[in-house]
Amino acid sequence: MVALDLSLPLPATDSLPGPAGVELARRAEDAGYGTVLVAETWGREAFGRLGYLAAATDRVRLGTGIVPVHSRSPTLLAQAIATLDELSGGRAVLGLGLSSPAVVENWHGVAFEPALRRQRETIEVVRAALSGETVEYDGELFDLEHFHLRFDPPRTDVPILVAAQGETNVELAGGFADGWMPNRIPVSALPAVREHVDRGARMQGRAPAEVRTVPYVTTCVLEDGARARRRCREMIAFYLGAMGEYHFRAVADHGYRAEAERVRERWQDGDREGARSAVGGALLDEIALAGTPEDAAAVLGEYEDVADGVVTLLPRTLSRAEIEETVDHVGTLAVD
């Protein structure tokens, strides 16, 4: 067993409506996961789901993983996370990110840039609101006067984590957040990229150790190890081939450019199976917990040296039985 804090993002699929999501959250809680996260893309809204989960769980932390900073005002985010913290008895976690120009501009009708400035000011306003004091904020994007929550927030220090890939965004996470959530950056590259977190923290007069590293790791752990590895290859090929530059560069810029290009080329040519098979074993073990419980234990041991926890990101193609088996296996491998 390894000392890592586990987070489970509930799959954002039609097969997991409210009651099914509750069952999975309870299963994760019983299995030893520390946190259950809810993503927000273009389906179910995050905070409503989290309030439902708060009433159905007892110990596990509950958070957004992630919501974009563009889709709500900073004060509304503060209201939402303070409300969740109250409903859950102090178990809330706020995960924020930038999303992408296509999502933000096409689906929300909001200008994406200046994205990094918006993220910084959002964090600052949320922290100010959670302090319980009246917010007077004079920023480049937000100019607020006389805002005050109409109830006492249960905690002034709800953890704020930022999903960040690029160097400047990673520095911002170090300067203003409580945690950094990279996605698909190879485990061997995490220490080098983490240096940007530390630099950002020092630039703001903070101790780098105040900022946790909690990477997203594609995860499928089954007794049938070969099947689990196929499932993870399916997800990785999809993200490298179809989900834009952020995910592609996370792999390509950290030692796997030729392989990432081969996957993307085959995917865009319509050769889905060829793209999946182009995800080699070495890359798979750098960005995924994929295989048998024994395989996963070995990889988790590598994360123990460079991270404070892992977010076990389940492939979209998993069946309900495969999801449950993965949660149970991974829960036995790590302790908070």
Image: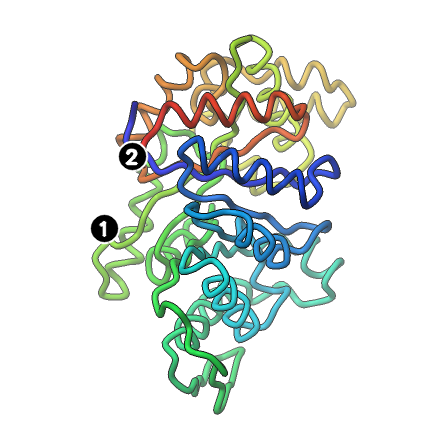
Q: Assess disc 1: are there few (<14), some (14-19) or many (≥20) residues with their C-alpha within 10 Å of its C-alpha.
A: few
Q: Give how far across and how far down residue 303 sits, in percent.
A: 33, 29
Q: Nearer the viewer, residue 159 or 268?
A: 159
207 to the left or right of 32? left
Up the image or down, 238 lies above or below 199; here it is above
Name the quadrant containing residue 112.
bottom right
Residue ID at (58%, 40%): 10
Label for residue 209? 1
Residue ID at (46%, 65%): 86
**Which color scheme does this rendered protein use?**
rainbow
Residue ID at (32%, 43%): 194
Which image quadrant: the C terminus? top left
The count of marks equals: 2
User: SS of the residue at dot 1?
Assistant: helix
292 to the left or right of 306? right
Which image quadrant: the N terminus? top left
> Which amino acid type is shown beneath numbered disc 2?
Val
Mark with earlier residue (2, 1)? 1
Q: Give how far across and how far down residue 226 sits, in percent.
A: 56, 8
Q: Assess disc 2: are there few (<14), some (14-19) or many (≥20) residues with their C-alpha within 10 Å of its C-alpha.
A: some
Name the quadrant containing residue 203.
bottom left
Up the image or down, 111 lies above or below 136; here it is above
Name the quadrant containing residue 23.
top right
User: SS of the residue at dot 2?
Assistant: loop
Up the image or down, 224 lies above or below 83; here it is above
61 to the left or right of 46? left
Q: Give how far across and how far down residue 76 sits, in percent.
A: 57, 72
Q: Nearer the viewer, residue 279 or 320?
A: 320
> Which amino acid type is shown beneath numbered disc 1?
Ala
Residue at the outermost right position:
270
Label for residue 306? 2
Residue at the outermost bottom position:
146
